Image: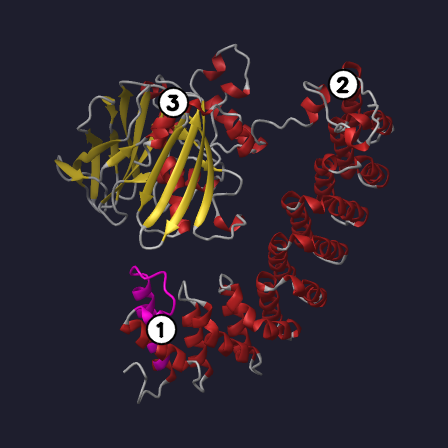
Amino acid sequence: GLAGEGIRSPLAIVILIRLSGKLLLGELTNGHNNVGDVRDVSSLCKLCFDFLESSLSHSDDMISYEAARTICMVPNLGIHNLSRSMECFRSMLLSDKPTVRFAAVRTLSEVIDQPRAVALCNEGLENCIDDDNKQIATFAVTTLLKTGGEATIDRILGNLSTLLASIQDEYKITMLESLQQLCLKYPSKHRAIVAFLAKILREEGGFDFKLSVVNSIVSLMKQVPETAESSLFHLCEFIDDCEYTMLSTHTIHIIANFVSMVAAPSRYIRFIYNRVILENSTIRAAAIAALSKIAASCPSLRTSITTLLKHSLNDEDDETRDRASIAVSVLKEAMALNPYVTPVVEEYDDISPDLPSEGDLAALIYLQPLPMSFKKLERSIKAYISTPGAMEGTDQLTFSALPIIEDSYEEDVLNTVHDLAVGFGSKSANTEVHDPAAAVYAIPELADLGRVFRSSSPVSLTEEETEYVVRCIKHILDEHVVLQFLIQNTVENQRIQNVIVELESSDSDTYEIIGDVPAEKAEYGETASAFTVLRKRTVEKIEPICFSCQLNFTAVQVDNDSGEPMGDGYAEEYLLEDLLISPSDYMAKICVSDFRQAWNGTDDSNEALGKFTMQPKTLDLAVSSVIELLGMAPCDGTGQLSKVNSSDPKQHMLHLSGKFLGGHEVLARVQLNVRPGEGTLLKIAVRSDDKAVSDAVMSCIN
């Protein structure tokens, strides 16, 4: 049967190949992940794999390709199981049919998790770099950049220069990402790669492409510090000839940020000051800001930079003139308070670093970042203004008094909450981000409870296809929890009235139900909000609590044409799914800029440690599950595996941070170790300034 005897239709054989692949995949994922030869797993695996390998030599290109592709898509196969399929791809790369070459090179680009196996096709991939079809050439280059060895980098870069001149910018950006990963893989080749990036930066290209090149160089400077000196010099040369004003200002600020990292910051000042003399007002203002930042970070250069800034005090542009005036004033006051004294040293090793002193005025103004971005600051101020009674007081407004804006609150999520309240099928032309707590403040009885600390994302309590679709938003306050139930009526010719959600829990020690605000009515296609208020009996003790939910309402039949009610209606009950309130609901997702520094600066006396085992999952799913369970924000790019340079795909270190109710800063380190067939082992350490908070966060995993 599987040998395909008597089957002449190529499509039928292709379907048989795909069926064999599914059977093989199912057998291997059923507790047989660690195998030597796939044929040794079971008789079914041997039958399927032999059939796939026999199809590799079929005369029809479609059949041989499908067989090779199916083998490569089976996870955890060794190179000895992939060798014949790679030989098939290698012959396809030499085909005179563009479709065959494209299919082969695209599939190889998707199986880069087996670099040793794909390396068998590197010779054919190098031949495809000069292919007339630019998509084939692009896939070939990106695959070589991800799988090629250190010895082939120079040859690949030579071929890449010719290709970049003839392809569109979107393909160039794809290659840049692969080139960046190659530099991280082989740091010793950073000079050649940075020089290549600088070369293409000076050539013709669009704004997006050149911005991607600059960002790639910056990323390499952060991850491979050895590239800082040469990279900064190349960026300084680039701003001399950059035709894009926005990109020039962006690059100037990058240079100012990294100048303090190099041995001789003074050599880069002339490049920036030339922009003050030769460029338009926007770039001049950016250059003044950059010089001010360099002076703040390098006290030894303040006198020289102040002299240069004085030349711009009479600039014709208001912004440039004001920035120069402020910088001169700040630097003069900083030098008066903390005069720079040239150190006297006998040996080079005795030279102290050129850093501003503690409490330095210039460093405070130009180097100390804001506690939040301007976008988050705007949203936080708007949320503060919307809080009842906030504008009536006379207290000074500080950052600590502003409402917390979570890093995970993207505009689409918040607008989704707003759309649910408006009703399905309606489109709002207003793209402004809406505060979920506004619905609470709109009801005077609820507004008196105080400010909302955070609002959760909507949690579904029903299926999307049911008669009544119910979602719940949990608004967390200091002493209360306000549950907002978004009830959507999808029953035609029916109106629901006096809608409330009845809650019951076996644990009455943690929360007390003190009131409800029913939804007046919801016509067909409308969404109404009902509220239930819970009071925390003990603020110090926060544990996961599960509530059983039931929707109670009065159903009234209405006339299809006039919309008038037909009768008095009748009481109706509708059972909902259980609602969980866990400590993660009290956690605001706030990401720290430097996790290691924050972790080392937090006392470990309140640390909570735990070890758990999760159900068998892939590493991607395990990471996302832990983030969801703890309700914290991932830091340092550890939330995505693709951003972590890890050699072991079964281990991962996750850094999380957040702010718990009451202003408690919480940090967590999670080590994940995937054990095939057994599950995922978690080792978690949680630190905060309160042991009860650390224990509450740890209970989220339980």
Q: Is the magenta stretch mostly helix, strand or loop?
A: helix
Mark 1 and mark 2 lie on one chain; the one further toward the N terminus is: 1
Mark 2 and mark 3 lie on one chain; the one further toward the N terminus is: 2
Q: What residue type is labelled 1?
A: Arg
Of tags 3 and 1, which is closer to the observer? 3
* Residue 30 is covered by the magenta coloring: yes
Task: Name the disc covering residue 18, or none.
Answer: 1
Mark 3 neighbour density, 10 Å: few (under 14) some (14–19) many (20 or more): some
Left or right: 320 in relation to 207: right
Q: Is residue 378 visible?
A: no
Left or right: 222 in relation to 604: right
What scheme was used to colour the molecule?
secondary structure
Residue 370 screen position, x and y as percent: 60, 27
Q: What's the CA distance linking mark 2 and mark 3? A: 42 Å
Residue reaching furthest to the front: 346
* Residue 624 is covered by the magenta coloring: no
Task: Name the disc covering residue 691, or none.
Answer: 3
- The residue wearing badge 2 is 334
Mark 1 neighbour density, 10 Å: few (under 14) some (14–19) many (20 or more): some
337 up-or-down from 457: above or below: above
Residue 648 screen position, x and y as percent: 48, 52
Q: Quadrant of the C terminus?
A: top left
Residue range of the region highlighted in magenta in the rendering: 13-41
Secondary structure beneath dot 1 equals helix
